[in-house]
Amino acid sequence: MATLSIPQNGKALKGKNRTQRTLPSVDLTAMVDLAFLLITFFMLTTSLSKFGAMDVAKPTEIPDQPYPASRTVTVLLGKDNGIVWYKGEMEKATPQRASFKQISTVLAQNKKEIARLYNNDPGKFMIVIIKPTESSTYKNFVDLLDEMSISDVKSYLIDDKSLLTQEQEYLQKLGAI
């Protein structure tokens, strides 16, 4: 006959022993070692991206040589991401507004027009004059330099000292300065 043991809650357990079983445990030491080996392997074999900086050689003085107006595009950087550009001389040109999304199209169109005007002569390339104003941001300036590289503009000049009075008046009229 089976013996009944009475637990503290008052109910009898029929035929069951009250022995405690130990739960199996998993040793994770090998898994941690493997994880550190994999992390070390991938850290040593992965090449990190190199910092890419654009070289800008800016002379201390801008030469006073006349630039050919038929090959010159001037880009004025204003406030609130505003860009005003014109082709040729300011007195004879019609300045136009552009956004940073449009500037690549503007540069490509002017580059094609100048190449067509000079029968694709490689010595007669487009010259871009970049004129940042005091109200423009450094980010916009760097973005425009990046766009010069992307658009493969062979010659550009950074003129941050001589904003013409007509350019200032036009930018004030547009509220871009």
Image: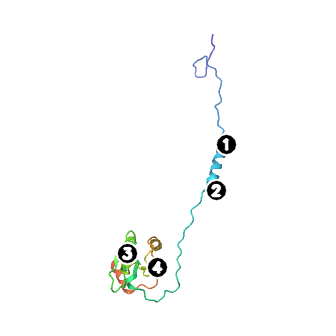
Q: Position of residue 116 (x, y in %)?
A: 36, 78
Q: Earlier in the sequence, mark 4 or mark 2?
A: 2
Q: Which residue is mark 1?
A: 30
Q: Which residue is mark 2?
A: 44
Q: Tell me the CA gap for discs 3 and 2.
A: 48 Å
Q: Tell me the CA gap for discs 4 and 3.
A: 15 Å
Compared to 27, does 171 lie above or below? below
Dots 4, 1 in contact, CB < 8 A: no
Q: Which residue is mark 4?
A: 155
Q: Position of residue 129 (x, y in %)?
A: 43, 80
Label 1 or label 2, whichever lies nearer to me, is 2
Q: Which residue is mark 3?
A: 112
Compared to 66, does 119 lie above or below? above
Residue at 51% across / 86% down in the picture?
61
100, 14: nearer the viewer: 100
Q: Earlier in the sequence, mark 1 or mark 2?
A: 1
Dots 3, 2 in contact, CB < 8 A: no
Location of residue 49 by image quarter = bottom right
Instruction: Tell me the amino acid under the disc marked 4.
Output: Ser
Label 1 or label 3, whichever lies nearer to me, is 3
Q: Tell me the CA gap for discs 1 and 2.
A: 21 Å
Image quarter of the C terminus:
bottom left
